[in-house]
Each structure stands twice: as C-alpha cells, then as structure tokens.
Image (cartoon, rainbow, N blue to C red):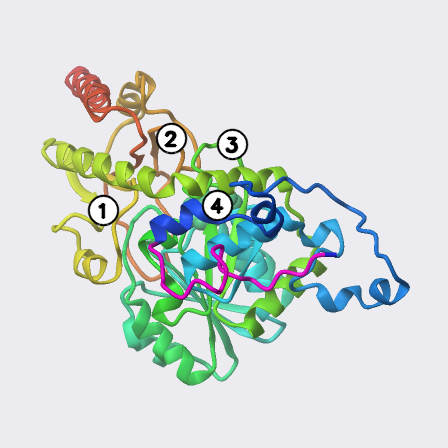
Amino acid sequence: MTNFSFDPPGGREEAREVSRTTTLLRSTSPSARGAGLLNPPVHRASTIVYSTVEEYLSRHSRLYDGVIYGLYGTETTYALASAITELERGYQAVITSSGTAAITLSLAAFLKAGDHLLVIDTAYRSTRRFCEETLANYGVHVSYFPHDIGDGIGALVQPNTRMIFLESPGSLTFELPEVRAVTTVARARGIITALDNTWATPMLFRPIEHGVDISIAAATKYLSGHSDVMLGSITAATEEVYKQLKDTAARWGNSVSPDDCYLVHRGLRTLDVRLDRHQRTALELTGWFAKQPEVRRVLYPALPSDPGHAIWRRDFDGASGLFGVLLDPMSAAESAAFFNGLKLFKLGASWGGFESLMVPAWPPPVRNCSVVEEGALVRVHAGLESVADLICDLEDAFARLRAARDCA
Ligand SMILES: Cc1ncc(COP(=O)(O)O)c(C=O)c1O
C-alpha cells in the first residue's frame, strides 16, 4: 500500500522554487519517478489487497493520503491532485467527476440545515440552480450579493452565515470581484470561502493567495484542453479543509477514472503554451469585434476599457480565451444568418478546448442584484486556430447579419 506525503513533484529536497511553467512539465507520481518514467502510470483499481489484518483494519486512517480502495483514488489520481495543488499553492486537492461536482461537493461539505450561504450574483447557472433547487430543499438559506460588493459583504453576513461562494470572472458577463476584500471579512467572521477559478486556471490566478479557503476548477476546460474529458478539482488551503472535502467526496461516492486523470495530467504539460495562444487570439478577436458597428461592448477583463481591468492587472498573470460580445438586439432570422453559416467557430456548450466556439447567451443570464445590459450577448471562445482564419469566419458572419438586416 502506498501513502503519499503530498511532496511537490521534484521532492522536498529541492529547496529552490521553480516556476509554474516548469512545474507543469515535471509533475509525476512516486512509482513513475522511481522507474524513470516521465508520466504517471494509469493505475486502475477497485479492490486493494493488504498484506496483514492490521493493515486492513486500519485502512480508513489512510483515506486522506493512501490508496485504500479504488473509489478514493489511485496513484494516478494523487499525481494529478498533487500537480494541481502545486499550481494552486494549496494544501491538497480532491479530484472530482466534473467541474459541477467540484462545486456541489465543496458546498455540501460545509453546509447543513439552518445555515446561510452567500453566493456571488454572477455565478455559473448550474451553481445557482444547485443552491436554489437542492441546497434550499436541504434547509440551507441562500442569498446573492453583487460582484462589486467588496468589504460591504460584512453588512450581508447573518449570525448563521457559514459560507461565501465566489466566481471570478462572472459567468457570461465577466465581472471581477475584489476577492481579497471579501475574504478578509470572511476570515474575521470565521466564514468559509470558495471560488470557481475555471476561467483563469491556477496559472493565471491563485485564489488561495487571496485568502480563499477552497479553489475550484472545472478541469474539463483548460486543464484538460482537448474537449474529451469531464473532471474537476477542489484545492483546499489547509489540512482541515482538505479532510472535510475528502470525507464528503468519499461519502457521496465521488469516483474518477484514472484514464481521465491521466489525460488531464497530460493536458497540464501544455497548459501554459495553450493559455498564451488563447490569450493572444482573444486579444486580436476582441479588438476586431470592438470595431464592428453592431457591437455595443466587449466583455473581457484584459481590455483597458473593461470595468474590471484594474483588478485584472493587479491580481491576474494573464487572461484566458473566453469573452463576451454584446451586439445590437438580433431577430431570430438575423441570429440564424449570423450563427448558422459559421465554419470554424462551432456552436457548443463548454469551452477551454482547442476549438473556437461561439454561442448565443440568451435567454439572458439570471441575476438578482444587477440588470443585464440590453442587447444580443454572445459568448466567444478563442481556440487555437489561426487568428486570420477566425477573422475571415467572423467577417462572413457579420456580412450575413447585415444582409439579413437589410432584408428585414
Ligand atoms: C465557470 C464554470 N464552472 C464550472 C463549470 C462546470 O464544469 P463541468 O462542465 O466540468 O461540470 C462550467 C461549465 O461550463 C463553467 O463554465
């Protein structure tokens, strides 16, 4: 039976810190390191056998760092968890079956009937639905706060507030919260904070360095990067938080395929170069969109014109490739003309893969504390294709849109 001490991939003997880029390239597992392999082997298992009855009877004490039953992870799972932990600068991560599972397990781990949960208004739709439709049924009280609340969050805290859930930037509308201001209040009041960090990944933003207790990523997106895996990660800032998350994941039967962990681990090798390309393409595309007369606003924190730009410059090491474009309202015929002839941009949910995507964000995102600007909001994912080819595809789409308007 193997126990993992969560050593950084290079081993604790290595005193000098290496860059995150290098971390992505050398993380592996103990047995791979011993055998001179660069990548962790795929360990598939349900039953794990023990050499003594004493080891068997004490196996649950090793839930947090040992391979004791397939459900709780094998060496392949721990290798991925440790690599993500190092990027997040956390204590240790739990790997979950999807990004959605990472969100729901994080909430379920700390909330009980009678507790109050504060959720950022710009949270991903499925997060909101879990809070309103599942947690509410379990007796948890949910309320929302505006993304720009800062330390004003203190006024919304109730005696039973147990947890604050953030997402940065906001889903579809890309607003950036002042994370440090919120976590400072939360820490002073003993409230747990979690943040969905899927857009930036820990390469570009590390929530734990900003006082967050739990950093969540849908590994389905950039960490895997190839649109062929569903997986999530929850990185805890402390041992106490990690144990609570690992216990909850075990009790809820969270299990992940070692093959999928292997694929995400392989995706990590190129995360840095992919993100760099996604960002460069997104900057070119957002500049192009901003010049089109039908475009009211481009929603991307890396743009100097974006309301969140100052926070982004201060807190982030870069931007990924997902942004919003608010166009003049479109009729059904205009939207069909715009979307249906696209050749390179595909119409599809999710993002973070190699392909460019463009989807209508209507009906408009649900918000409690803010008004969604009027217009046709489109979500764009800048993929890894040639930017010149992507712009040709967009020129054709805008030409079709204009022709449809002229006919109306
Ligand atoms: C911000 C954000 N978080 C979490 C998720 C959920 O991830 P998954 O699709 O892996 O369940 C998504 C999915 O689109 C997302 O956009």
Q: Quadrant of residue 349?
A: top left
Instruction: State which tag comes first along the sequence, 4 or 2.
Output: 4
Residue 301, percent from left and from top: 22, 51
The numbered mark, 1 or 3, whose residue comes first in the sequence reads: 3
* Residue with the mark numbered 1: 300
Give the numbered dot on residue 354. 2
Label 1 and label 4: CA atoms lie apart by: 21 Å
Label 3 neighbourhood size at 10 Å, few (<14), some (14-19), many (20+)?
few
Three-letter amino acid code at the position of disc 3: Asp
Residue at 54% over, 49% down: 80
Locate residue 259, reporting x and y percent.
61, 37
Disc 4 CB within 8 Å of nearest ligand 1 atom: yes
- Upstream in sequence: badge 3 or badge 4: 4
Q: Is residue 149 left or right of residue 144?
A: left
Range of the magenta residues? 2-19
Asked if residue 30 lies in the magenta stretch, the reply is: no
Residue 350 horizontal/vertical position (percent): 44, 37
